[in-house]
Image (tube, coloured by chain):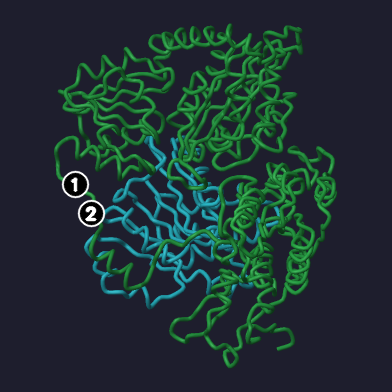
Chain colours: A cyan, B green
Amino acid sequence: MQYVIVGIGGQGILFSSKVLGKIALSRGESVMGSEVHGMAQRGGSVISHFKIGQYKSPLVKAGEADALLAFDQNEAVRNLHFLRNGGSLIVNVHDAAALGNEHLKAYIREHDIRVYPLEGYELLKKHMNGNFLFLNVLIVGAMCGADVGNVSYEEVRNAVRELSPAKFADANMKVLELGYEALKGV
Amino acid sequence: MEVAKTVSTRAILLGNEAIARGVVEAGCLVAAAYPGTPSSEILPAIAGYADELGAKTVVEWGVNEKVAFEMAVSAAFTGVRSCAVMKQVGLNVAADPFMSAAHFDLRSGMLLICADDPGPHSSQTEQDSRFFAMFAKIPCFDPCDAVEAKAMVFDAFDLSEKHNIITMLRPSVRVDHCRQDVELGDIIARDQGFRFEKDPLRWTCLPAGVKINHPKLNAKNDAIREEFETDYARYNYEVKASGQAKLGVITSGVQFSVVMDILKSWKRNDIDVLKIGTPYPLPVRMVTDFIDRHENVLILEETYPVMEMQLPDRTKVQGRWNKVVPGAGELLPEVVEELLVKVLGGQETVTADANLKAALEELRITPRKPMLCPGCPHRASFFSIRQSLPAAINPSDIGCYTLGINQKGVDAVIDMGASVTISSGFFMAQKASGMDAKPIVATIGDSTFFHMGIPGLVSAVYNRHALVLAILDNGITAMTGGQANPAVGDKLRKGDKGAVVDIEGVCRGCGVSFVKTVKAYDVKAGKDVIKEAWEHAKANQTPAVVIFRHPCMLLRQKQDTIPVRVNHDACVGCKFCINFFNCPGLVFDEAKKKAVIDERFCVSCGVCRNVCPHGAIVSTEGE
């Protein structure tokens, strides 16, 4: 499995690969990934690559990702070329109208991409008092709900629980479920 | 004697953590660094693993890379294993001791870990430190991933000790910031007592010593090259194609990993790959033999032709000399794929999809550039400085505040500490040309001030240069991930207290006669004091210092929250706030032609209330 995770510096995208890594390790599988640190992560576009299985390079090549997790919809469009034909996109939507762009729809159709939109900001406003720092857990939950990424909800729950600092543990589990339920069976 | 602890297990580590783990397991007892992407995580991880494994390793930030390198290398005069850690441009700062100490016959192992940044992602150059190893005539290891990087640490220490020479580990950014499952081991026990034997010819860099040591250094290089030819098959080896090879690819470092994954995805069996993990001194026989056996050869290495230029004859090789391989930029998988297709005589396959291109254009989506965080005190400081003296020239420095370019508050940046010296250069040029002096207001961060700002400031005082230096003190080294520095006083390990070095006191000690401190969020006070500082500088022909103080947002200290909104009756759509304040939380609605608060990013610092010339940004308090 090859994942590409994109967003804006400060959104906490590295959390997703930590969760995936924990799961892979508990299964006894090898992992390889790449992260962004330093000036490149300061408020600008950020990208994280993550591969589970027998790979050597930390980078996913364009056209080979099985799943694209996008914390920001503009970053989703910018990085859509990473997805293979038939790949899946989980995308946090803040401007649904833009996703109706005809060229975008044509690309998605041609490449048989399954799109799972998630109104993350609205959900966090409604249920988490507008604390957008929970976006990372929400998206991991949504990925699981949409049955994308080849990980079970149980595995994700265990990994998130282990990775959560004690004071956020309960809130993180709540947000995880929120994301899971939002895209479950879509 | 270290006590070995049994902890063998696997963990997913950042490449930099794997390197740090290797350093501790190899029994390194002195480690020093200055933070810099992509190397910053290594030193804190050394401290973490040393604590976990019960090692007594002394781990410290130096105020700059020269300081860190000198501390580490001199520990290796005494029988104690040591390492210095820095980014590629950090080695420029440490070049003087590096070039000199390369000649020394060290007593114990000394490893220089120098992290390169092809791209570059977070640097002012994409220089190749392997060339620096060649320049200093010391051996260099170039790992292809985190697992190999950790293994190479042990070999680099052993090689260093065998030949009494500094060795370099050169991880590139994709190794530093890869995440991989890595085997954890125990500390290898070794005797390491402090023993310094007086021997001036050995430990001083006198020309008389160089006459002995330089030929000796050459002999070491010859011996190490021979060892790399025969004894390092774990790092230097050939992956043979199962079929008849149409192409031979020579790789160094992470390029090996990139090529192997492409070949796997292509399912091709007609390409041989030679992996070199020790690019200097290059095992020339091994590489030449590979070239001789192939009609078509491609050489891939980042970012300079270090292996290529060591070849006695490179005319048969497709590389940088004949411009087949790009001479700048990162060799990403897409670039390498295209190169492979090209040298195999095929058509280029990677083309931008027309639909995706059109969608990006119509939706006006461009890469989001790095910017100061919402609530960042630097944004307020830049706004004050810029509004106070709009005609001023604004040199700046290396750190988060280089992003003040978005606030139009950064006109020139060269390297660490040059904010002061660029200002001096401008002052001298204005003086020479007999022009009326334009105000010069430079910005520098707290950590960068200690790193290399002080010599320039002393020079400006001594030479009577009229300039204002604004020190943006956010109590942290922010860009590289939040390391403490002398102004903070905390050392690397939690609870390890150092002494606080007071910035105001340092400036006064350097002879600066005007030193004032303001709260960074207080825009009015900031504007006033910058004006006053420039008047003082001009009248007395001397530098003046203003310290803008407020904690970095990454420290997440509690502060007042002042929620704001844009009053659209008052907003005239002039974009002044966008152009000069440029906050992620304040954006322009092209449809309405008004500024709006982007609640996804706004942290309610309230500073922007002082920004709008029409008073359109107001507090929602009580609404």
On the image, the x and y values in percent for residue B488 come to 78, 47
Q: Residue B351 carries which label?
A: 2
Amino acid carrying mark 1 in the image: Glu
Residue B286 vertical placement versus B610 (above, below): above
The disc numbered 1 marks a residue on which chain?
B
Disc 2 and disc 1: Cα gap in Å? 8 Å
Label 1 secondary element: loop
Q: Are marks 2 and 1 in contact (CB under 8 Å)?
A: yes
Give residue B583's position: percent from left, percent from top. 58, 69
Establish if B480 lies above or below B56: below
The residue sitting at the bottom extreme is: B569
- Who's the residue at 61% across and 62% down the image? B435
Residue type of the residue flagged with mark 2: Thr
- For residue B214, above or below residue B364: above
Locate residue A54: give its quadrant: top left
- Please rate how many residues cluster around mark 2, counting C-alpha atoms within 10 Å: few if below 14, some from 14 to 19, many from 20: few
**Circle 1 sits on which residue?**
B348
Task: Give the left or right position of residue B55, taking residue B298 as reference.
Answer: right
The answer to whether any part of residue B242 appears in the image is: yes
Judging depth in this view, the residue of B218 and B208 nearest the camera is B208
Pick whichever, B526 or A136, lies toward us: B526
Q: What percent of the width, then of the height, locates residue B50?
A: 69, 28
